[in-house]
Image: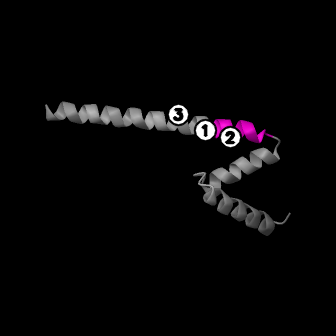
Amino acid sequence: MSHRDTADALEALFEVSNLLNTGLNRNSLSILVQLCELGVNPGALVHVVQELRRESGRLAQQEDDARSLASFGQLS
């Protein structure tokens, strides 16, 4: 597959990814495709991406909570 064919295929995958609202950017999608091509189980990748998103959301919530508490402390 030529570089242009690879780029076109990735662009098509990115368009499908956007239509499915996956939230993956081009770079993330490219990495996931490369991992699949190396033989990584796609189902395992799904699990890892979902878990990373959950953890990221949990950490963001903790940061928001800490900022709110700090802000509340400054108001008192």
Q: Amino acid at mark 1?
A: Gln
Pinpoint residue 1: horizontal percent, then vertical percent.
Answer: 86, 63
Q: Main secondary structure of the magenta part?
A: helix
Verify whether residue 36 appears in magenta.
no
Task: Identify the residue shown where x is 53% and y is 36%.
Answer: 54
Q: Is residue 31 left or right of residue 66?
A: right
Q: Which quadrant of the view contains residue 71?
A: top left
Q: Which residue is mark 2?
A: 46
Q: Amino acid at mark 3?
A: Glu
Quadrant for the C terminus in the image: top left
| 1 versus 73 height, above or below | below
Separation of residues labelled 2 and 1 (CA atoms): 6 Å
Pinpoint residue 41: horizontal percent, then vertical percent.
Answer: 78, 38
Q: Amino acid at mark 2?
A: Val
The stretch in magenta equals 40-50
Q: Earlier in the sequence, mark 1 or mark 3?
A: 1
Verify whether residue 44 appears in magenta.
yes
Q: Which residue is mark 3?
A: 55
Indicate the secondary structure of the residue bearing disc 1: helix
Q: Residues within 10 Å of mark 1 (few under 14, many from 20)?
A: few
Separation of residues labelled 3 and 2 (CA atoms): 14 Å
